[in-house]
């Protein structure tokens, strides 16, 4: 069987099983199996496959029809300017989260050594992207999941930041270090009802720990806001990713904790997604 034939066959198989983007998915899967860039596959469609590669390809398709996300099958996801190793222990980085990076960079001058903390780092996509953009920053990232910390450390190493970011496996409630200029967090913020309505790809494959914010989705946002009050310096900034229906509750929580609201930014689909605030006292 050649590339062209297996791509056609694979695409039909995914289509029959109601997988959207079937054409792109099979091209990426074939590219992983034969270890050739996707563009080159398309230029060499008459190349023949080894039997062992056909079996690998079929096994990946069987995973995909069970709605396993492509980022777990391929083992990576692009975020900001980089490729991040991704597995089922961590949330898949989302394009909307790049908004957090854009906002954070505005508070991180190039020549200053600001002290920054990422709460719930997952793949490490936020802190690694920031450290790449602002190498002078002192960067710390925490996560309650040791598996996530290990993925984040590996990603840091891949991006030549081994030992340049302090990764700590700890629950935010137990974390004591303070004096941060900037805290960023994309905590789990999905409510129980929303969780039950998510696509199967997300609901059955991504870690609940990284998605679920308890009954109302606010459990971890509350923790992060309260805790940031003691971890930040006066005038330090808190940049939070939120669920688009959580703006008012989050503003209330921030006000109660004496934060000044600088701005609320919208995501790529125009929904409120990020709150930038300042610790006043
Ligand atoms: N900080 C990581 C991200 O934004 C993980 C977030 C999470 O696990 N909730 O992708």
Image (cartoon, rainbow, N blue to C red):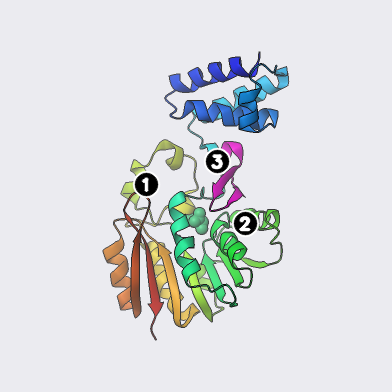
In the image, 280 versus 210, the foreground residue is 280
Q: Position of residue 214 (x, y in %)?
A: 38, 57
Secondary element type, mark 2: helix
Q: Nearer the viewer, residue 164 or 87?
A: 164
Question: Residue 255 — which label?
Answer: none
User: Mark on residue 71?
Assistant: 3
Circle 1 packing at 10 Å, graded few (<14), some (14-19), many (20+), is: some
Q: How much space separates mark 3 and mark 2, taking CA atoms? A: 15 Å
Q: Which residue is denoted by mark 1 in the rendering?
A: 195
Which residue shows up at 43% across the image and 29% down it? 20
Label 3, secondary structure: give it.
Answer: helix
Q: In this view of the protein, can residue 257 be seen by the observer?
A: no
| Disc nearer the start of the sequence (3/2) | 3
Between 73 and 9, the one lying in front of the other is 9
Q: CA distance from mark 1 to mark 2?
A: 25 Å
Q: Which residue is mark 2?
A: 152
Does the magenta run of residues contain 264? Answer: no
Mark 3 close to ligand 1, CB under 8 Å: no
Q: Residues within 10 Å of mark 2 (few under 14, many from 20)?
A: many
Residue at (69% x, 18% y) in the render = 47
Q: Position of residue 275 (x, y in %)?
A: 37, 66
Q: Mark 2 and mark 3 in contact (Cβ < 8 Å)?
A: no
Left or right: 212 as drawn, with respect to 126: left
């Amino acid at each position: 069987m050649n590339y062209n034939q297996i791509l056609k066959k694979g695409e039909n198989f995914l289509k029959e099983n109601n997988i959207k983007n079937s054409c792109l998915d099979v091209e990426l899967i074939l590219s992983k199996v034969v270890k050739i860039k996707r563009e080159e596959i398309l230029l060499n469609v008459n190349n023949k496959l080894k039997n062992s590669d056909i079996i690998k390809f079929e096994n990946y398709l069987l995973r995909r029809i069970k709605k396993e996300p492509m980022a777990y099958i391929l083992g990576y996801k692009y975020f900001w300017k980089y490729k991040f190793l991704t597995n089922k222990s961590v949330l898949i980085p989302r394009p909307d989260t790049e908004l957090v990076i854009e906002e954070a960079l505005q508070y991180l001058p190039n020549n200053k050594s600001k002290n920054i903390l990422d709460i719930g780092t997952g793949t490490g996509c936020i802190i690694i992207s920031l450290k790449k953009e602002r190498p002078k920053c002192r960067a710390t990232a925490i996560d309650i999941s040791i598996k996530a910390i290990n993925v984040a450390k590996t990603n840091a190493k891949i991006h030549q930041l081994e030992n340049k970011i302090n990764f700590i496996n700890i629950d935010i409630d137990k974390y004591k270090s303070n004096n941060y200029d900037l805290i960023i967090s994309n905590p789990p913020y999905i409510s129980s009802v929303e969780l039950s309505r998510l696509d199967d790809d997300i609901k059955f494959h991504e870690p609940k720990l990284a998605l679920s914010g308890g009954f109302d989705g606010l459990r971890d946002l509350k923790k992060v806001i309260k805790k940031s009050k003691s971890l930040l310096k006066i005038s330090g900034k808190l940049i939070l990713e939120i669920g688009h229906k959580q703006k008012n509750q989050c503003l209330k929580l921030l006000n109660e904790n004496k934060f000044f609201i600088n701005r609320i930014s919208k995501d790529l689909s125009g929904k409120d997604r990020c709150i930038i605030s300042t610790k006043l006292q």
